[in-house]
Amino acid sequence: MRRSVYNDDHEAFRLLVRDFITKEVADDYPKWEKAGQMPREVFARLGEIGVTGMAVPEQYGGAGQEDFRYNVILQEEAARALVTLSTVRTQLDVILPYFLRYADTEQRDRWFPGLAEGTRLTAIAMTEPGTGSDLAGVTTTAVRDGDHYVLNGAKTFITGGLLADLVIVVARTSTDPDNRRSGLSLLVVEDGMDGFERGRVLDKMGCKVQDTVELSFTDVRVPVANLLGEEGAAFGYLGHNLPQERMTVAAGSVAQARAALTTTIEYVKERKAFGRPVSGFQNTKFELASISAEVEAAQAMLDRAVLDLVDGELSAADAARVKLFCTEMQARAVDRCLQLFGGYGYMMEYPIARLYTDARVARIYAGTSEVMKSIIAKSLGL
């Protein structure tokens, strides 16, 4: 279907990204999958062409363009090439907004040039072994001691934590028995600080190029100058960025579902069964036609929400609706596409197998489907 979400500048950026992925990513991607990460130098090369600094203010070497549509294009082009860009999505869509919104002038001077160049990598540490969606249950503590905080605790499922130079840690700096959400703060832990340790690299079902690790903090002395925003205000900060976090998951889901459809159409035209192409069977035609309709419906819903996000008008409930619909659609679409590959769809040498395993987490992170339904139900007065 015709889309009207992009202008000429966006399409020029698309061609830039497409050329980069073709030349710098596609051929080496299988090696990155085996290694479990994308090399640091690729982040820097993305910085050289302006991708990592797109939203960073110009005085720090960026383009000063906080337009989420550029972020969506990154995902669309990666999916089109049947690859992912490791933790770039997390860095640009999820983490960078916290720095842009809450960093003070001194912090910007220290950190923003490297963020723009793609030489300073980031992670955000929210989830703990005993807490998932319940951020108010965070037990990692940061106790003020002069001009430092003493940080203690553990985090898990931290995307990009292996290579991160800066880790935004959600920690409890005070406790209010009457308000579990108060007293949380954001502290930026820097690589090399004493007591900051990286634990296991977790062995995930999918998303193999995107490292996920455990982190621990034992009496880490974090300068007060590394407090991001105001002390005790983190819960509100985390909620403010959730609509965009959910849009980035939804955008990936639609792009990858479309990629699954495209690669399946190509496969069924070539693959023969009972003496003729699989594409000639009515079941194949009906399945792919149905998947196509679902992808286009999700795309239209996503495009509307992206424009609302750019205009600052996307509500939490609408973000939840889009995330729920797009991720559930992706699950259905990729599963049905894999079925048309038959036994070959179960083999990891075929991209559809990776698309299938990568898709599963979309209904979990940035808020599970069940959490999305709860948010939507609340907006209905239920």
Image: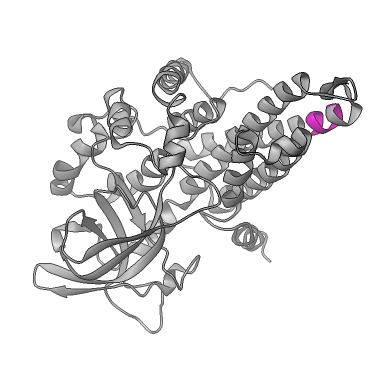
Q: Which residue is drawn at 17% across and 74% down?
A: 144
Q: How many labels does the image show?
A: 0
Residue 117: image quadrant is top left
Q: Residue at x 61, y 50 (%)?
A: 360
Up the image or down, 1 lies above or below 369; here it is above
Residue 366 rendering spot, x and y as whole percentages: 51, 54
Secondary structure mainly formed by the magenta segment = helix
Q: Is residue 68 visible in the rendered structure shown here? A: no
Q: Which residue is drawn at 40% across and 47% down?
A: 94
Residue 116 rendering spot, x and y as whole percentages: 25, 34
Residue 35: image quadrant is top left
Q: Which residue is at the far bottom?
A: 177
Drawn side of residue 36 relative to residue 39, left or right: right
Q: From the viewer's side, name the closer residue of 284 and 92.
A: 284
Drawn side of residue 344 relative to residue 147, left or right: right
Drawn side of residue 134 relative to residue 344, left or right: left
The N terminus: image quadrant: top right
Which stretch is magenta? 285-290
Residue 264 rendering spot, x and y as whole percentages: 71, 28
Q: Which residue is at the far left?
A: 146
Render colour scheme: one colour
Q: Is residue 348 visible in the rendered structure shown here? A: yes
Up the image or down, 105 lies above or below 302; here it is below
Residue 103 rendering spot, x and y as whole percentages: 23, 49
Q: Which residue is drawn at 44% across and 23% down?
A: 21
Question: Is residue 344 one of those drawn in magenta?
Answer: no
The C terminus: image quadrant: bottom right
Drawn side of residue 142 relative to residue 298, left or right: left
Q: From the viewer's side, name the closer residue of 181 and 157.
A: 157
